[in-house]
Image (cartoon, rainbow, N blue to C red):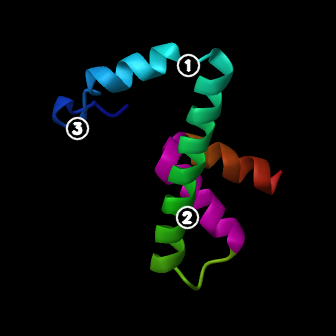
Amino acid sequence: MRTIDPRNIEVPEPAVIEALRKMSGRESLRQSLESHELGRRLVESGVRGDHADWSDDEVQIEIIRRMHGDAVAALAVRHRDA
C-alpha cells in the first residue's frame, strides 16, 4: 500500500468548504461525479497521447490503473479475460 505524502494534500479554502456544506446530497454527488468524469477524460487524453498505438481496451485498463491503482486494474483485466 502506498503512503500518502502530506505535502501533496491541499486544504480547501473556507469559502469552498462553506459552499460544499450548503449543497444538498444530490448536488454534492453530482459535483463529485462531474469532477471524476473530468479527471477520467484528462487521464484518457494523456494515455492516448502517450500510446497512440494502443487499443481502446488497453487505454481503458491504463486509465483504471492510473486512477485506482494496480490492484483494481488487475481485477479489470481478470474480468475482461473471463
Depth-wise, is mark 2 or mark 1 nearer the camera?
1
The residue at 49%/60% (across/down) is: 43
| Element assignment for label 2 | helix
User: Within 10 Å of the Cα at label 2, are there few (<14), some (14-19), or many (20+) other Cα atoms?
Assistant: some
Magenta range is: 56-71
> Toward which corner of the image does residue 26 lie, by quadrant?
top right
Residue kind at label 1, given as amino acid type? Met
Q: Which callout, 1 or 3, points at the residue further toward the start of the chain? A: 3
Q: Does 9 appear above or below 80?
A: above
Q: Which callout, 2 or 1, points at the residue further toward the start of the chain? A: 1
Residue kind at label 3, given as amino acid type? Asn
| Element assignment for label 1 | loop
Q: In this view, does 56 lie to the left or right of 36?
A: right
Residue beneath label 3, please? Answer: 8
Q: Which callout, 3 or 2, points at the residue further toward the start of the chain? A: 3
Q: Does 46 appear above or below 5?
A: below
The residue at 68%/48% (across/down) is: 76
The residue at 56%/43% (across/down) is: 36
Q: Which residue is the extreme one toward the right?
A: 82
